[in-house]
Image (tube, rainbow, N blue to C red):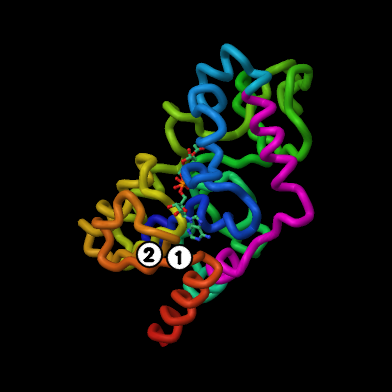
Amino acid sequence: MADTVIEMVVLTGAGVSKESGINTFRDAEGEWTKYRIEDVASPEAFASNPGIVHSFYNARRAHLLEAEVQPNAAHRALVQLEEVLGDRFMLITQNVDDLHERAGSRRVIHMHGELLKARCTHCGAVTDVTVDLGQGESCPTCAQENTLRPHIVWFGEMPLQMEEIFQALGRCSHFIAIGTSGTVYPAALFVEHASKSGATTVELNLEKSENARSFGESIYGPATTVVPQFVESYLRRRV
Ligand code: OAD
């Protein structure tokens, strides 16, 4: 990957999974209107009250696994891009769901972690999890008890694979942000980084994001409409 020219970097946020039945964070019904970030999504909360943190993520994991939560047309359109562009395409998501993978995306960078994974605070091993986490489990790798935490990047923690991401942003020709409010850093800075390197930048969102002014072009509408249209038009213009 290091020497490959990157044609397109796509960053997705909660808006891409909204029409699959997963709540966003900052819309009227969003998760952060019902919970305080510092109570459920910080290392301090986990240290002082792991039960509350586990129950927040257990509920979200159980919901993700419900039969009606399925990838939508926006997830599927991004699979098409990967199929055509191969390793000149990079998909980065802030989402912790697995809907990109279920749609068929093969290489997805989950910069904020994954709901269906647990991490051992003792040995660091990351393992698959589809059941509730709580007190009492032991790590399948090192066998220590009560050391599993959700594999989620909490506020104050470093997002994952940042070196790889910034390398790609520094040499991509297109940067597309989909369904993200542009309020959480460092993801909100990606557009400026790509832009400085000469990339064409486009945001696809339901409404203006916080950093809309940093994009060369903005297309507004529900992801299941605007993403397939964008992909179709991009691939048609490319041939
Ligand atoms: P937000 O909830 O902040 O923003 C979601 C964006 O999606 C908003 O701009 C909405 O307008 C847009 N949106 C809603 N429905 C849509 C639809 N059907 N089609 C297209 N767009 C739609 O979510 P993120 O920007 O993803 O971090 O939030 C970033 C991070 O903040 C998350 O990864 C999470 C959160 O705290 C962690 O948990 C670490």
Q: Is residue 77 visible?
A: yes
Q: Please provide percent x and percent y for residue 90.
A: 45, 60
Q: Position of residue 132 (x, y in %)?
A: 76, 31
Based on the displayed image, in which of its 4 quarters is residue 194 positioned?
A: bottom left
Q: What's the residue type where badge 1 is placed? A: Phe
Label 2 vs label 1: CA separation? Answer: 6 Å
The residue under label 1 is 89
> Which quadrant of the figure has residue 47?
top right
| Residue 204 in the image, given as x and y percentages of width and height | 41, 64
Which stretch is magenta? 53-79
| Label 2 close to label 1 by CB (< 8 Å) | yes
- What residue is at 30 percent from the left and 60 percent from the top? 171
Q: Residues within 10 Å of mark 2 (few under 14, many from 20)?
A: many
Residue pictured at 56% horizontal, 33% vertical: 34
Was residue 61 drawn as part of the magenta stretch in this picture?
A: yes
Quadrant assignment, res 133: top right
